[in-house]
Amino acid sequence: MVFRRRRRQRRQPPHFTYSRWDGSQTGFQVDADHLFDELADDLLYHGDVNNALCQMMQGGMQDMDGRQMEGIRDMLDKLRDRRREILDNHDLGGVFDDIAEALREVVEEERKALSDMVEQAAESGDERREELAGDSATMKNMELDMLPPDLAGQVKGLQNYEFESEEAQQKFEELMEQLREQLMQQQLDQIADGVNNMSPEDMQRMKDMLSELNKMLEQRANGEEPDFQKFMEDYGDFFPENPQTLDELLEVMAQRMAQAQQMMNSMSPEQRQQLQELSNQLMEDMDLNFQMNQLAENLREQFPQMGWGQGYDFQGQDPLDMPQAMDMMGELGDIDQLDNLLRGATNPGALAEVDIDRARDLLGDESAESLERMAELARMLEEAGLIENREGRYELTPRAIRKIGNGALEEIFKQMSDDMMGKHELHKAGQGHEREYETKAYEYGDPFNLHIEQTLRNSIARSGGGTPVRLHPDDFEIERTEQQVRSATVLMLDISMSMAMRDNFLPAKKVTMALHSLISSQYPRDFLGMVSFSEVAREFNAATLPELSWDYVYGTNMQHSFQLARKMLARESGTKQIIMITDGEPTAHITKSGQPYFNYPPSQETVDLTLAEVAKCTREDIRINTFVLDVTHYLRHFVEQISRMNGGRAFFTTNDNLGDYILHDFVEHKKSMVRGRR
């Protein structure tokens, strides 16, 4: 068997180059608007941009062409499968089998040479030569027979053995050379190429380099700044990768040494002992060993996160030689590093730390493309003016809030018939302040919004001209104005835990966003207040609406919510109404001491206090329209009681058509108000 020499491919330190997406690059097609639409439901459900981005990163998304971008969960599954494949199929025992087989070949080559020597001496006819050859062969065979069973012992014995065969000696020396290089490469990947054929001067220079490296690490530990440039001027030829900083150099060296230690940790105790003894035997220069051990110790302190104590449970049958084992350890290390980075990525910017080329090797082209695109998500949204970074957290901008509301409104509109919606236009003149650019003859009781130009024309036409112009009441022409009606609405949104448990929260929040968008765009003079309620009630506004989420507490406090709604409407004019969305009975109220009280089933005190607030709303001419989800017999009875007391309406609906009911009812209510003013 010929000992296999395999040059391990060097893994370069991560480096990245970024450029603005200009549409010419191949890959997934995503723009900010599409991305924001994909995020919309998560934004509404969780109320947090950072959480929504994290959810998208985890689960992936579809691009504008319908292609699925992989999420982090899919990538972690791929890494787990690849790790399992390596460990289930390979065995580190091949590291020693390969060396043992190479040593056996050396010994067999030597024994064959000894046999040939005895045979040639016998054929010569020289008895003395035959006797000496026989004695020498016997002694050398006995010496070979006495070689220890362990690899380190065999190496030491053959190092002291005087070979008869030049071919066997050459094979042994080549084997030692390869093993030294591999053991050195196992520890110091960058400088392994320089280990072969080193002169004593070269060896001393390498020891000086390691000593200087240790010195720089000690300087850094003491708070000093090492002279890395001077080090590279003196020893840069040891590092063909040309690292630009001390950190870059040390990180790669630490990763390599940690992987070597992980390979040792992954072996059985017997295998580990054999490799250690073999290493000691081959790296017999004590000063070199000291410097390397010192470097490993310093790097362990500098990079404790590298997994120095980690090992892998190889359970396969395919034996690995040392170069293959180091390749596998490198791949496992890269898998673990990428795994840890992906698991710890809580925002898209963290994915910029991924070595995309290595990720492509481990996961494939599509996963690498997905990582590249996901790393740009937050930047795309920022540049589009939809989110902004505030003290390390992303927040929605006003533009984004409007976009969410318009999207929710559009989604609900799609479910409704065209004739259900319309602006409350009226072609009859009435009081107001919006000009229609039309005039009419003045009648008693009209607002005296005199149209000067038309009034003068009427006077001139009546009198035939001349000065001074004399006005008569019949000449007066006034400006027409649009019929204006104003309403004030408070939307009461149930955010108790049952809303989330029954999948009612997201549709209800979409309706809230849509109603806000409808009123702010179509009825800008109307007032919309918003109150959330669970154990207690809280007022919120459009800026905080996207962040609204359900409460992890028990309680449906309608009483407190009605109180807040009444106070908000007391400051407003026009027709007043409350729209309440709920899926539960009143199970909480505020006590006289100001503390929330909860009980299920609802206590009579809670019911009475809630109905007392309904009565106050009725006296203040505030109509209550209730939209009930997941109705129960008791809830139906209670809501019908509210309607009888207040005169408002009750709608028993589902989360599928909640938006149809509310928006249609709101607009129809506006139309009826206009008709009532004619």
Image (cartoon, grey):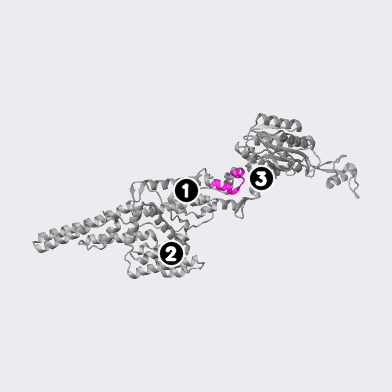
Is residue 231 in the magenta section?
A: no
Q: Nearer the viewer, residue 487 or 545?
A: 545
Which badge, 2 or 3, comes first in the chain's sequence? Answer: 2
Instruction: Identify the mark at residue 242; answer none if there is no mark.
Output: 2
Residue 118 visible from this viewpoint: yes
Q: Is residue 135 above or below residue 269?
A: below
Is residue 51 in the magenta section?
A: yes
Query: Where are the magenta residues, as a range?
Result: 42-56
284 with respect to 523 (left or right): left
Magenta stretch prevailing secondary structure: helix
Q: Residues within 10 Å of mark 3 (few under 14, many from 20)?
A: some
Q: Position of residue 365 (x, y in %)?
A: 45, 49
Using the numbered discs, state the Cα–Cα distance from disc 1 to disc 3 in whole angstroms.
35 Å
235 with respect to 627 (left or right): left
Q: Is residue 410 above or below residue 8?
A: above
Q: Position of residue 181 (x, y in %)?
A: 34, 61
Q: Is residue 456 above or below residue 169?
A: above
Which badge, 1 or 2, comes first in the chain's sequence? Answer: 2
Using the numbered discs, state the Cα–Cα distance from disc 2 to disc 3 in whole angstroms.
53 Å
Quarter of the figure with residue 390: bottom right
The three-letter amino acid code for the residue at tag 1 is Ser
Q: Residues within 10 Å of mark 1 (few under 14, many from 20)?
A: many
Residue under the image location 86 percent in, 46 percent down: 456
Residue at disc 3, secondary structure? helix
Which badge, 1 or 3, comes first in the chain's sequence? Answer: 1
Q: Is residue 660 above or below residue 225?
A: above
The three-letter amino acid code for the residue at tag 2 is Asn
Residue at disc 1, secondary structure? helix
Instruction: Identify the mark at residue 75; answer none if there is no mark.
Output: none
Which quarter of the figure is the C terminus placed in? top right
Instruction: Give the residue number, with chain letter if any, for mark 1.
Output: 367
The three-letter amino acid code for the residue at tag 3 is Leu
